[in-house]
Image (cartoon, helix red, strand yellow):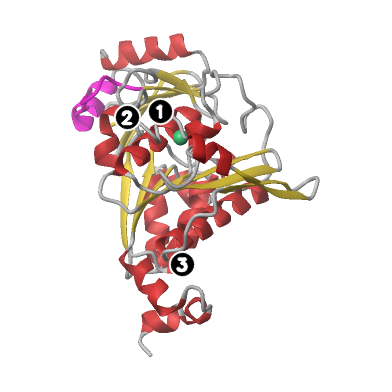
């Protein structure tokens, strides 16, 4: 028995997957969007299951408050300050060095959706906000790609495998995205790690089933670990009606008609300022200029500057900036404007 066969021998022995299912996993290309709690758990399970190509998409860096639930990171990653996508890729390569792992340090947006999500067989939602989820849903519906919706808050979680044209999509379920601040977040309501780990694990299982050729159930799992309640919700009625995104050609987020600009980052005292489409920053040049602004630390992906006591500006090569130490979007915009001239 070769090493790969030995490694996966126990899951191949599980008859519904079998050697044929394992071969499909090895040939599969999966994008995990967001490498936080859900993305960490799902990506780790998919890598260990032998999914041949994993693209890890994330816009952020690991922080100490992530460690209770973001299982791909440790204290050394927080100290190193590498982007989550890069740190996660490094970790997964130590788990299975034969896999193809592709880190993408980017903030998924209408302008880059085709580049960030293109060329995969399935997408796993590891995001923490509805704007990004709607983009994923619209891209997946347009390209007829399956994707796995997941969410966790407090001790609760939900998972739905979306197969466009066969199941309900996110817009069928949530016709209008909630207003910013209109829903509890991990910031306001908190979260316990196991809730996120369960969601990530179920997402990975749903992904493995779809990749192995199993038909989607069309049912959404909803659970509350604190109350000990688990149920599934049949969405067949919603799927039958469909919506303008999964039944038609309406893609308002993908077309850039809604969304964009600034966002207060979930669970952080920080604001992200997104650039206009196609913007790039010469990080080396900026690192030199930034010496005038304050203390600079730089790596090939991020330049950080302490612009004021307690306020740090982090600039990425794709033109994004994250201002830490404030939740004031206007103030963040002004700091970015005066630091980057953007
Ligand atoms: Zn729909």
Label 1 near ligand 1 (CB < 8 Å): yes
Q: Is residue 59 visible?
A: no
* 70 is higher (above) or lower (below) than 281: below
Find out whether residue 285 is within the magenta segment: yes
- The residue singled out by tag 2 in the image is 249
Q: Which residues are magenta?
A: 274-291
* 24 is higher (above) or lower (below) than 265: below
Mark positioned earlier in the residue sequence (1 or 2): 1
Q: Nearer the viewer, residue 165 or 146?
A: 165
- Separation of marks 2 and 3 at Cα, in angstroms: 37 Å
- Separation of marks 3 and 1 at Cα, in angstroms: 37 Å
- The residue singled out by tag 3 in the image is 48
Q: Secondary structure at mark 2?
A: loop
Neighbor class of circle 3 (other Cα within 10 Å; few <14, some 14-19, many 20+) is: some
Q: Position of residue 137 (x, y in %)?
A: 41, 37
Mark positioned earlier in the residue sequence (2 or 3): 3
- Separation of marks 1 and 2 at Cα, in angstroms: 6 Å
Find out whether residue 60 is within the magenta segment: no
Q: Position of residue 117 (x, y in %)?
A: 31, 43
Outermost residue toward the bottom in this view: 1
**Marker disc for residue 244:** 1
């Amino acid at each position: 028995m070769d090493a790969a066969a030995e490694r996966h021998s126990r899951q191949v022995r599980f008859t519904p997957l079998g050697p044929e299912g394992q071969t499909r996993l090895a040939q599969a290309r999966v994008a995990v969007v967001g490498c936080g709690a859900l993305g960490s758990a799902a990506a780790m399970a998919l890598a260990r299951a032998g999914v041949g190509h994993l693209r890890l998409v994330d816009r952020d860096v690991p922080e100490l408050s992530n460690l209770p639930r973001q299982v791909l990171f440790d204290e050394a990653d927080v100290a190193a300050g590498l982007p989550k996508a890069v740190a996660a890729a490094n970790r997964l390569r130590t788990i299975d060095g034969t896999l193809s792992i592709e880190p993408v340090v980017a903030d998924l947006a209408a302008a880059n959706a085709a580049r960030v999500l293109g060329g995969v067989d399935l997408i796993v939602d590891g995001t923490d906000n509805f704007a990004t989820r709607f983009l994923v849903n619209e891209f997946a519906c347009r390209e007829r790609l399956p994707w796995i919706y997941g969410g966790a808050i407090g001790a609760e979680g939900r998972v739905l495998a979306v197969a466009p044209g066969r199941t309900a999509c996110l817009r069928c379920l949530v016709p209008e995205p909630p207003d910013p601040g209109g829903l509890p977040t991990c910031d306001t309501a908190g979260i316990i790690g196991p809730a996120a780990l369960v969601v990530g694990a179920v997402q990975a299982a749903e992904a493995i089933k779809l990749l192995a050729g199993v038909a989607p159930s069309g049912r959404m799992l909803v659970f509350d670990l604190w109350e000990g309640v688990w149920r599934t919700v049949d969405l067949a009625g919603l799927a039958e009606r469909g919506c303008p995104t999964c039944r038609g050609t309406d893609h308002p987020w993908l077309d850039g008609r809604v969304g964009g600009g600034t966002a207060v980052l979930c669970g952080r005292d920080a604001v992200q300022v997104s650039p206009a489409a196609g913007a790039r920053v010469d990080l080396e040049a900026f690192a030199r200029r930034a010496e005038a602004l304050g203390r600079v630390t730089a790596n090939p992906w991020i330049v950080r500057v302490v612009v004021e006591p307690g306020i740090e500006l982090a600039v990425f090569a794709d033109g994004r900036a994250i201002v830490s130490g404030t939740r004031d979007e206007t103030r963040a915009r002004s700091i970015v404007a005066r630091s980057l001239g953007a």
